[in-house]
Image (cartoon, rainbow, N blue to C red):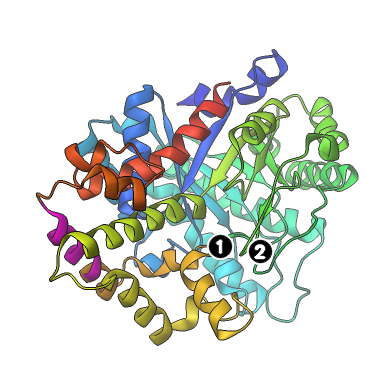
Amino acid sequence: MSSFLTGLAGDLRAGHPRGVTSVCSSHPIVIRAALRRAVLDESDVLIEATCNQVNQFGGYTGMQPADFVRFVLQIADEEGLAPARIVFGGDHLGPNPWKGDAPEAAMEKAEAMVEAYVAAGFRKIHLDASMGCLGEPVALDDETTAGRAARLASRADAVAREKGLPLPLYIIGTEVPVPGGADHALSDLQPTAPEAARHTIEVHRRIFAERGLDGVFERVLGVVVQPGVEFGSENVIPYHPENASLLNAVLEEEPKLVFEAHSTDYQSQAALTALVRDGYAILKVGPGLTFALREALYGLDLVASELEPTYGDRPLRAAMEHLMLREPKDWKGHYHGTDAEQALQRHYSYSDRIRYYWNRPEAEAAVARLRDALDGRVIPETLMRQFLPFLDVGLGQTGSVDDILIASVDRELATYAAACRA
């Protein structure tokens, strides 16, 4: 595992840039697809959980960090992937879930979360204390952010030593807009200013040293910056290398670091390859994978409506609409426009906020009904071409529903795999 992540900077400087796909999802189909891809490629795999998704209180998945590890390892066992081939990462670990609390209270919860992550076996830790808490500005200055990051790193190291675990590897910095994509259409996006990236690195290095954490900073693998890629609800901003050339040059001054790029979902293989070439060695993807899953689920919903008279007219789509209207918390405020426009966004937005609903009982029951309707059925090539044209039509004859879903997710993962080894 060590060279899988720690060798990224050296490979870049040696003229052999290599990337790592960071899979940020808790959906079992997505996890299974990622682990199956690792078996196929005979590679290690990086699986990450976010602070809101998984924490000591359960997050929105209901899983604590140890639960998440057990969940992934169970699927890995079924797929024949050795646990040693999986690197677990924690994304945006800091006070974000509790930013409505007073700063000290929020940081105490953040420390407890980091402790739970490290104790559970998470090795790659993104330290992100950039958000303001109660009574503070929305975004904090680098001095305050670095001080809080050092506090979290100190706790993480202490837990690792106490448990006899490998010391964590760290990522610093954050990106704008917020994780998960913007909530509006985008027309332009500026990369992080080079001086801002330099300042983030310098301040973290200095404050870690002042707190006696020089050795800890040596385990900082990379820095999150904005290379000028993002997706909104309806469009994607592609990577333009020429716009980020001055930012990319910062890495020439930092031979032990690489950049980590968030929100790379929906980028083309050419764009992802260029990102890796330019030093963005860790490519995070999440909504793009569950978007591909939803594409296949809705395609199969249409197939079943055609094949099975008792199935009804797209009942999966109807169930998801009913669920999201009844429980709007996870999309309301993110989607805008007329009622009709919001209805389209609920199901088809690149932001893919429908992903928050797949683990709810009503959604699981609707997916189970879809599986039952197609169980043992041969899907005619013509229906595959009509409703799932992005997949091999032969899957309709040879594959199960889950095989079709995994193939849809793997189309995206294969694009990342190709870009990371180009």
Q: Position of residue 378 (x, y in %)?
A: 15, 46
Q: Position of residue 379 (x, y in %)?
A: 20, 47
Q: Position of residue 349 (x, y in %)?
A: 54, 64
Q: Is residue 192 above or below residue 179?
A: above
The residue labelled by disc 1 is 351
For disc 2, the neighbor class at 10 Å (few under 14, some 14 to 19, many from 20) is many
Quadrant of residue 274 within the rendered picture = top right
| CB contact under 8 Å: marks 1 and 2 | yes
Q: Is residue 71 above or below residue 1?
A: below
Judging depth in this view, the residue of 153 and 27 nearest the camera is: 27
Query: Considering the image in quadrants, where does the N terminus appear?
Result: top left
Q: Main secondary structure of the magenta part?
A: helix
> Which residue appears at 51% of the width and 72% of the height?
344
Work out which residue is located at the far front of the displayed protein and give it. Answer: 382
Judging depth in this view, the residue of 100 and 259 nearest the camera is: 259
Quadrant of residue 148 within the rendered picture = bottom right
Judging depth in this view, the residue of 381 and 94 nearest the camera is: 381
Bounds of the magenta segment: 366-375
Q: Is residue 365 magenta?
A: no
